[in-house]
């Protein structure tokens, strides 16, 4: 277990390093320099700016310096969106809104998706199962912006007389509903499908046969014996879903005009504010990687096959 | 006698031999030994079905998958043959046909509606078309031509007027309702209606047109085509790279395999969407520079695809093949372990049979399914990026960028968003459903 | 006399037919099986894979999974018709009156619950008023009975922490904890080492004597049958081809298939130069079962009639019968002889 943990953490750190390097080198692949897109400055100004931001040094020195700064929490300063403000400061200001929406979305996805999956497995080959399967397959086939705009259109005044929620995000609890619904819909459907598969897989295991031979009631068999085993793999699907939700946030924040990090990230891409792009990418990547790490660790803890070997 | 009695107690199944012999007069040669050929002909062997035939049989029985397949084929025809039939192109701006709804009123009906509105509101509200016509006439009278900018301004103000009129006065829609006039399907501009009245064959704007007078249906067709091409290319790319990497890793084994698997592990945990966004943000200027640097084949290719699509393919090539490589590596490892395969061959078993019995059912099914399911996920991703404005670059269009363009006018023209969105969702849905069907059909584990 | 016989009869299976309704068509997995089992008796069901022996056992305990279905015949346990029971009644019968243990102890215990949890659950499913402490106590006694030491520690362990043999002991303990009258053991020793096999068999014999149960022992290992069974049914392609006391089956096999099985079994007492003789060929396709005897194509002594008609059962001795035309031929000959002698007497 400890060995696994160490290996997993090392992988995570290396991944982060790789992301940082990719980010760095991609930035350097951009032709010209960041100052060119504005009014053409004189050569002297460019040199001065290059010297100021250390762009005149060799690439590897720059990389080393960049990584060193990252470790210290220095993500550079924004060059366009909020000129000269530290990137980390901007990120930390924007992130809480995104995180709130994301967490709520994942929460409802898990709370609704997993039981629905169980229900579908329990009632397999009935109309409930078919209905859920149709809904969930449609759900994983609709890109986030379709769900978001559909909700926006139908529930925010697009249909006459129906205006349940504010169309623009204003921070009130009501304005959180639609973004969270839209953002959590895909993970909900996905988790529900995975839970159903895992449950059916679990139900076909031999220990279920034993449980049936013992004379246990169907409910006990499904909810005690099958569910616990099915939930273990479902946890592994959670990690990628967190990453997915975070990226889906980009779209949902754009559609609902939420002043979160996702929308800001897109805007900074459109405005070519490179330090901000780099900083946000690394920040989000770090967040996703850490989340994945946590999920993996949880998985190992929940599964007694690993947990107890450590004990003995 | 005592003996027979004991027999009868022994279960009801014990038949009376004499009875049996009486019922079926046994042929005289009944107890002669059977010949080998007789024995052979006796086994009514089930028609031995090949793996693919069997899979196809199961797939055919899956109604959902078959319906999905039909829709996929229809969508493909729609995307590839459609633009050949429709006389408009996706970037052609048809003057006088701007912002048409996918329905129209006949000229007489329009007259009636206008009269009605005039009657009820006193002041005549000019429709957009009329305002432009009027302005154009005025301009021509002054010896000038109406520039696009001016036209757009007039359009905007006419729109505003109409909308403000709608608040206080009667809209065309209400008027039509009052008069019991029903709109006809498909969009035509008034000019086109006149031409049509003159007996010309005018192709309708089935889904209407956008603000720049581009036919939405053609754009949807082209967008669908882009999606399909992106999906298929991405799937092929993933298959090739994944297969290569996986087989090298599995075949070499040892240290090489170990290192390669660590790399896979790292790539696996890289958040790929962020990297794609980053790639398209950073590669765009570089590719644009390259594009302008000359007139070679590569440059043309870049121009054709647009820098964003290229960065997307790069991302696919870099990040998305890991699952595929894992599957293939696993299969190769399994095959390597099966020493008995080699042994059986050495003993004279037919290699072809081993491959068709063991390798194909285990491996190909999974590879085909994974490759196929890559198509909808690539389409999904492409639409996501296009929606965010970092996907397909203009003038080429895609379903995602059409949705993104339509977002600002969502309240007035919801269909401009929902038509491409519906086609996109339908396409991904049917591809997913067919992929699921394919998996069920190809997975020998589910064979009963 | 008649009454006594009824009392000692535990299980009666009559002309049982089980079919699987697959997309490709109906597969008659079990086609007319008849036997009965008394208290204190162990019956072996022998046959190769796919001969329907497990399916037959599952239908007794009501564990047949869709698309499998009992289409004919009857199963009677202690005079009660098992096929007429509702699903809920079957639930209360399973585990308490009929228990079953399975082939693979590695996968048959739920990996995420402790041994103790799973044992107590089996007990408390049928005795709701048993307290937790009482259940734990009984579970530990049961574990001791099946030869597990250090029971208190074992109760808290997870299945993966036990060896295969130990797990099979746990399975047996779980099956017997409610003192069932009938135990169905579906190849319980196949997945174990030979030494462990012997121990488990010994244990089962001992527990059977103690609890006066009937055991149906499904296996393809004739050695195991010789070890533990009182009588044997030999199955081939869903049909019972021979049935009888274990000695009769081993020393006077009536059916060519049984003889083939015996010849293909390694024996300790065999002469060193004696070779094992496999049965040539593969079993018939159960989807299109032929009209005649299913074994005919592999049978060295097949006759023309074998390919046309299923043979009837012929008594070969007390409680020993086989379905083979060879036996019919023998029987006819002997009857003819009888008739002739009678006839000559009359003359």
Image: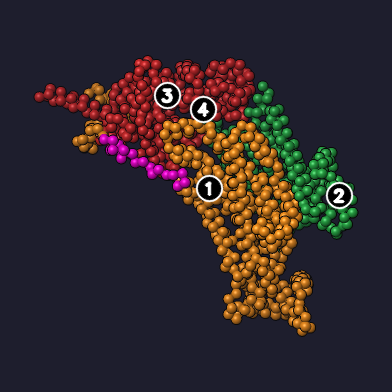
Q: Residue shown at 22%/23% (left/top)?
A: B1
Chain identifier of the green chain = A
Q: Which chain is red?
A: C
Q: Residues within 10 Å of mark 4 (few under 14, many from 20)?
A: many
Q: Are marks 2 and 1 in contact (CB under 8 Å)?
A: no
**Residue at the disc numbered 3:** C221
Spatial CA span between label 4 and label 1 = 32 Å
Q: Which mark is residue B324?
A: none
The CA span between labels 3 and 4 is: 15 Å
Residue at screen point 67% across, 38% down: B263
Element on which disc 1 rests? helix
Q: Are marks 3 and 1 on the same chain?
A: no
> Distance between the Cα atoms at labels 3 and 2?
83 Å
Disc 2 vs disc 4: Cβ atoms closer than 8 Å? no
At mark 4, the secondary structure is loop
Task: Give the letter of the orange chain.
Answer: B
Dot 2 falls on a residue whose secondary structure is helix
Q: Quadrant of residue A14?
A: top right
Of tags 3 and 2, the one toward the viewer is 2
**C168 left or right, relative to A275:** left
Residue C104's mark?
4
**Residue at image mark 2:** A50
Alpha carbon separation for disc pair 2 and 1 = 56 Å
- Determine the CA span between mark 2 and mark 4: 71 Å
Question: Horizontally, is C294 left or right of C183 in the view?
Answer: left
Residue B166 makes an appearance in the image: yes
Residue B438's tag is 1
């Amino acid at each position: 277990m400890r060995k696994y943990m160490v290996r997993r953490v090392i992988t995570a750190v290396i991944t982060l390093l790789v992301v940082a390097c990719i980010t760095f080198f991609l930035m350097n692949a951009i032709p010209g320099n960041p100052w060119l897109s504005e009014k053409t400055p004189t050569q002297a100004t460019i040199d001065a700016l290059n010297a100021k931001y250390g762009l005149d040094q060799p690439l590897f020195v720059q990389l080393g310096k960049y990584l060193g700064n990252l470790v210290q929490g220095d993500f550079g300063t924004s060059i366009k969106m909020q000129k000269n403000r530290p990137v980390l400061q901007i990120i930390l200001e924007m992130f809480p809104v995104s995180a709130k929406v994301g967490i709520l979305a994942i929460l409802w996805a898990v709370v609704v998706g997993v039981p629905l999956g169980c229900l579908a497995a329990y009632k397999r080959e009935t109309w409930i199962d078919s209905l859920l399967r149709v809904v969930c397959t449609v759900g994983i086939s609709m890109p986030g912006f379709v769900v978001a705009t559909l909700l926006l259109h139908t529930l925010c005044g697009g249909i006459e007389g129906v205006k349940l929620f504010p169309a623009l995000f204003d921070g009130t609890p009501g304005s959180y509903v639609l973004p969270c619904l839209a953002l959590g819909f895909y993970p909900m459907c996905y988790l529900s499908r995975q839970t159903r598969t895992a449950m059916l897989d679990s139900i076909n295991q031999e220990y279920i046969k034993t449980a049936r031979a013992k004379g246990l009631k169907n409910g006990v068999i499904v909810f005690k014996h099958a569910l616990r085993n099915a939930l273990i793999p479902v946890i592994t699907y959670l990690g990628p879903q967190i990453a997915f939700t975070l990226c889906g946030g980009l779209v949902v924040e754009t559609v609902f005009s939420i002043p979160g990090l996702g929308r800001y990230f897109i805007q900074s891409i459109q405005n070519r504010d490179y330090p901000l792009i780099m900083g946000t990418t690394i920040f989000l990547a770090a967040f996703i990687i850490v989340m994945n790490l946590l999920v993996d660790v949880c998985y190992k803890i929940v599964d007694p096959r690993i947990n107890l070997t450590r004990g003995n | 006698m005592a003996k027979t009695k004991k027999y009868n107690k022994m279960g009801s199944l014990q038949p009376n031999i004499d009875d049996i012999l009486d019922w079926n007069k046994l042929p005289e040669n009944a107890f002669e030994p059977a010949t080998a050929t007789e024995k052979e002909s006796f086994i009514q062997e089930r028609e031995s079905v090949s793996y693919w035939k069997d899979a196809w049989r199961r797939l055919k029985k899956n109604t959902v998958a078959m319906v999905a397949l039909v829709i996929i084929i229809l969508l493909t025809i729609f995307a590839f043959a459609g633009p050949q039939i429709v006389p408009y192109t996706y970037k052609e701006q048809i003057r006088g046909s701007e912002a048409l709804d996918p329905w129209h009123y006949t000229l007489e009906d329009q007259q009636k509606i206008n009269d009605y509105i005039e009657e009820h509101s006193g002041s005549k509200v000019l429709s957009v078309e009329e305002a432009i016509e009027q302005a154009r006439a005025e301009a021509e009278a002054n010896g000038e031509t109406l520039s696009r900018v001016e036209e757009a301004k007039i359009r905007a103000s006419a729109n505003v007027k109409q909308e403000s009129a709608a608040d206080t006065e009667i809209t065309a829609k209400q008027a039509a309702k009052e008069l019991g006039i029903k709109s006809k399907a498909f969009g035509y501009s008034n000019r086109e209606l006149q031409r049509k009245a003159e007996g010309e064959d005018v192709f309708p704007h089935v889904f209407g047109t956008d603000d720049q007078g581009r036919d939405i249906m053609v754009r949807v067709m082209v967008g669908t085509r882009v999606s399909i091409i992106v999906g298929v290319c991405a799937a092929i790319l993933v298959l090739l790279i994944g297969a290569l990497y996986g087989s090298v890793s599995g075949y070499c084994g040892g240290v090489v395999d170990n290192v390669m698997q660590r790399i896979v592990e790292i790539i696996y945990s890289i958040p790929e969407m962020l990297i794609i966004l980053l790639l398209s943000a950073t590669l765009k200027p570089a590719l644009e520079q390259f594009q302008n640097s000359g007139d070679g084949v590569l440059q043309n290719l870049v121009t054709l695809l647009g820098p964003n699509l290229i960065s997307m393919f790069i991302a696919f090539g870099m990040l998305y093949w890991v699952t595929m490589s894992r599957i293939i590596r696993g299969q190769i490892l399994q095959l390597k372990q099966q020493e008995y395969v080699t042994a059986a061959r050495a003993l004279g078993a037919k290699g072809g049979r081993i491959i068709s019995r063991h390798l194909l059912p285990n491996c190909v099914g999974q590879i085909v399914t994974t490759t196929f399911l890559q198509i909808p996920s690539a389409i999904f991703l492409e639409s996501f990026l296009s929606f965010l404005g970092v996907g397909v670059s203009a003038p080429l269009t895609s379903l995602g960028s059409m949705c993104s363009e339509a977002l600002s006018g969502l309240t007035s023209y919801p269909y401009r968003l929902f038509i491409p969105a519906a086609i996109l969702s339908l396409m991904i849905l049917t591809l997913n459903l067919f992929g699921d069907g394919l998996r069920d059909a190809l997975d020998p584990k589910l064979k009963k | 006399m008649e009454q006594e016989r009824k009392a000692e009869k535990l299980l009666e299976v009559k002309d049982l037919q089980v079919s699987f309704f697959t997309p490709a068509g109906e597969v008659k997995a079990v086609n007319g099986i008849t036997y009965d089992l008394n208290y204190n008796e162990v019956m072996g069901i022998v046959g190769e894979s796919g001969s329907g022996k497990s399916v037959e056992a599952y239908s007794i305990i009501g564990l047949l999974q869709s698309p499998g279905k009992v289409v004919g015949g009857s199963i009677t346990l202690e005079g009660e018709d098992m096929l007429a029971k509702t699903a809920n009644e079957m639930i209360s019968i399973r585990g308490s009156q009929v228990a079953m243990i399975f082939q693979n102890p590695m996968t048959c215990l739920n990996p995420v619950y402790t041994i103790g949890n799973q044992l107590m659950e089996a007990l408390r499913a049928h005795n709701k008023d048993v307290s937790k402490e009482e259940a734990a106590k009984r579970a530990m006694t049961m574990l001791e009975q099946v030869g597990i030491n250090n029971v208190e520690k074992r109760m808290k362990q997870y299945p993966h922490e036990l060896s295969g043999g130990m797990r099979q002991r746990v399975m047996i303990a779980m099956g017997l904890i409610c003192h069932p009258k009938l135990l169905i053991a579906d190849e319980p020793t196949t997945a174990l080492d030979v030494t462990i096999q012997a121990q488990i068999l010994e244990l089962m014999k001992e527990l059977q004597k103690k609890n006066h149960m009937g055991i149906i022992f499904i296996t393809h290992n004739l050695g195991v049958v010789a070890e533990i069974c009182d009588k044997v049914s030999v199955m081939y392609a869903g049909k019972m081809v021979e049935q009888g006391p274990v000695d009769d089956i081993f020393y006077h096999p009536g059916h060519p298939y049984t003889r083939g099985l015996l010849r293909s079994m390694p024996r300790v007492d065999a002469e060193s130069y004696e070779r094992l003789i496999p049965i040539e060929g593969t079993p018939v396709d159960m989807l299109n079962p032929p009209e005649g005897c299913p074994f005919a194509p592999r049978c060295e002594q097949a006759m023309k009639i074998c390919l046309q008609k299923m043979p009837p059962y012929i008594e070969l001795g007390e409680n020993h019968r086989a379905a083979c035309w060879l036996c019919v031929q023998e029987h006819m000959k002997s009857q003819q002889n009888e008739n002739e002698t009678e006839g000559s007497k009359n003359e």
